[in-house]
Image (cartoon, rainbow, N blue to C red):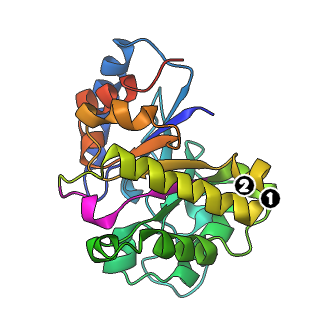
Amino acid sequence: MAKLILGNWKLNNTVLDTKVFIENFKTQMDKIEKNKKVKIGLAVPYTCLPIAKFKYAYTLAQNVSEFDKGAYTSQISVDMIKQFKNVKGSLVGHSECRSLLNESDAQINKKVLNLLAKDMQTIFCIGETKEIYEKGQTIDVIKSQIQQGLQGVTENNLRNLVVAYEPIWAIGTGLTATDEVVDKVCGEIHNILADLFGKAQGKKIAVVYGGSVKSESSGKLLALSNVDGVLVGGGSLKPEEFVKIIDSAPKF
């Protein structure tokens, strides 16, 4: 399985900023040896989707509505992002959407099903708070998030599903879970997915880690046996740093 290097710009970058990034990203990528074992995606703001066409990466949205159309002011449907040929999918269930927008597991489940039904890559985000982590309840919480968030998902559309484990206490804080913890939790996620979909099918689902990923730590994270990639926040805003993370992926 190819390693996934995914970036999430969050509430950053205008159209002009994106144009500058596209050029600088290409320049930096041209300098490194290309790794056929790596796939790269960038989740950008809605306003940048039409012009976010990268030579070395595909484009993702950061969220979608669970609805297709109707009186849902401010929402963006799957079809609205799919009209742009460069956009291949979206994040869903990010902890910032769960907390700031009060998104429930039931809502996130509808988004997952909608994206997968329309053949779009679905980056399904899960993770626990620091309180849950310190109580030793991480696995119980993420198992519940997976079971509820993936309810109704069938084997037919697993190829477009990616699970992103992002411990909430490590997002944007500068804190990173130890390699041992990351590998253990991602391994447990693989086991949960195998229980849900069968061992053979469960292996097809990539599990990536996110949480203050930097070029200094990405190489070790990407070498972990249970980690299929990384989801990068702030580091994906700077082309040079993002390319360093990409270049740190194993080349075997």
Query: Helix or strand or loop: what does disc 1 sit on?
Result: helix
Residue placed furthest toward the bottom:
71
Q: Quadrant of residue 249?
A: top left
Instruction: Judge whether residue 150 is colored magenta.
Output: no
Which is nearer the eye, 6 or 26? 6
Residue 224 marker: none
Residue 43 in sight: no
Q: How would you rate the neighbour count of disc 1 (Cα within 10 Å): few for under 14, some for 14-19, many for 20 or more?
A: few
| Left or right: residue 248 compared with residue 192 | left
- Give the crowd class for mark 2: few <14, some 14-19, many >=20 residues within 10 Å: some
The image quadrant where one finds the N terminus is: top right
Question: Residue 152: x and y, percent?
Answer: 74, 74
- The quadrant where residue 37 appears: top right
Q: Which residue is painted at 31% across and 78% down in the image?
A: 100
Name the element at disc 2. Answer: helix
To which residue does mark 1 refer? 155
Front-most of residues 220 and 241 = 220
Which residues make up the magenta segment? 162-173
Image location of residue 67, percent across then percent down = 60, 78
The C terminus sits in image quarter: top right
252, 158: nearer the viewer: 252
Report how many numbered discs are placed on residues in the image: 2
As displayed, is residue 177 above or below residue 196? above
Q: Is residue 52 above or below residue 115?
A: above
Report the residue at 37% width, 47% height from top. Answer: 180
Q: What residue is disc 2 on?
A: 158
The residue depicted at 39 percent of the width and 76 percent of the height is: 98
Where is residue 96 drawn, in percent x and y?
Answer: 33, 70
> Of the residues shown, which amino acid type is indicated by label 2?
Leu
Three-letter amino acid code of the residue under disc 1 = Glu
Marks 2 and 1, Cα distance to the nearest angstrom?
5 Å
In the rendered structure, the answer to whether residue 159 lies left or right of residue 237 reads right
